[in-house]
Image: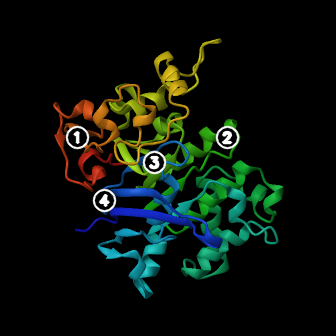
Amino acid sequence: MPALLEARRVRKVFHGGGAFGGAATQTVAVDDFSMSVCAETPSFVTVAGESGSGKTTIARLLLGLAPPTSGQVLYQGRDVHTLKGDGLRAYRKDVQAIFQDPFEVYNPFYKVDHILTTPIRKFKLADSKEHARDLIVEALETVGLRPDETLGRYPHQLSGGQRQRITIARALLLKPRLIIADEPVSMVDASLRATILESLHGLFSKFGISFIYITHDLTTAYQVTDSLVILYHGFVAEAGPVEELIKQPQHPYTRQLISSIPVTEPGRGWLDEKVAQNEAEASAATDSELGCRYAGRCVDVMPRCRSTMPALYQTDSRRACACFLHEESGVALPQGEDLTRLFTTPTTPA
């Protein structure tokens, strides 16, 4: 059976400049990236990395909002950019999105009810107004909202947390098989993040909805995910089960991300001393164009790192790392290997 959704060796290049005699430029946002979501067993996978790593570009590619420069995004084995009619309709129903800024989803001239009634009407989910009302009430209560405190109001009359949970309720109305959540709590007050993350994980554990969670925050990733893919400048640096990856990172970049998490001890710095020193020395360095993209910032850099891109090495049965440090102990994987198929063991929701 084909995967529900699959990215197969996708590459996305953005072109710029060239106007008025200026030099043309190109930026490789994502390169040779592959992942898949099982059609039968739900999974919760996080794609993480700092700003500019290609996370949001991957989300847009998977949602069909942008075409890949090369490679394919497939829904049940069919290219999403060739889908029409019932196939496109099924894709739009099965694959839903939750975006970073909940306010941008709303039209300020409409009450929030509008984003809930629209999918019901478009996908013919209810056979009467009463049925539609029941579906909306059920969805709102599932994400922890009281219908009498949210319906009938305009977006500006609700908090950011309420607006985001309404967008989650909207996705739930369609009973999707996959939700792609792009930084869903980054613009929400810290006091509400746990509530929203709990709502998202509840959809996975109670309803069997798969998730691709996009974030720069490893703390929230650790709270909700099964498996983690770390990106750096469009390339996979490391992938594996979240517990193992966070506690025993294998790539220098992953170690830096983890060491950058604020600690609770007053007066203690965020960065490991060795990493901080290297960052200062490499502050003027640019990312390598030929070799490892992280070479200019890496504390373990070797001469070959600046001239040769490392392969992804399988370091144990469920992990991979793109670093020459694991060349002898690991097994080089084929280019474009689907890491989520290799290194995730989806947890069947209870």
- Of residues 159 and 319, which is closer to you in this image? 319
Name the residue tied to disc 3.
233
Between the C-alphas of marks 4 and 2, the distance is: 31 Å
Between the C-alphas of marks 3 and 1, the distance is: 18 Å
In the image: residue 77, left or right of residue 122: left
Q: Is residue 295 visible?
A: yes
Of marks 3 and 4, the one in the foreground = 3
Residue type, mark 3 in image: His
Name the residue tied to disc 1.
313
Q: Is residue 350 visible?
A: no
Name the residue tied to disc 4.
38
What is the total number of numbered labels drawn onto the structure image? 4
Question: Residue furthest toward the bottom?
Answer: 85
Q: Quadrant of residue 99?
A: bottom right
Of marks 4 and 1, the one in the foreground = 1
**Mark drawn on residue 84:** none
Between the C-alphas of marks 2 and 3, the distance is: 30 Å
Name the residue tied to disc 2.
192
Residue occupying image coordinates x 44% and y 48%: 47
Of marks 2 and 3, the one in the foreground = 3
Crowd band around label 3 with a 10 angstrom C-alpha radius: few (<14), some (14–19), many (20+) = many
Between the C-alphas of marks 1 and 2, the distance is: 39 Å
Q: Position of residue 68 (x, y in %)?
A: 42, 69
Question: Residue furthest toward the front?
Answer: 21
Residue type, mark 1 in image: Tyr
Dot 1 or dot 2: first in sequence order is 2
Crowd band around label 4 with a 10 angstrom C-alpha radius: few (<14), some (14–19), many (20+) = many
Residue type, mark 4 in image: Cys
Crowd band around label 1 with a 10 angstrom C-alpha radius: few (<14), some (14–19), many (20+) = many
| Mark 4 residue element | loop
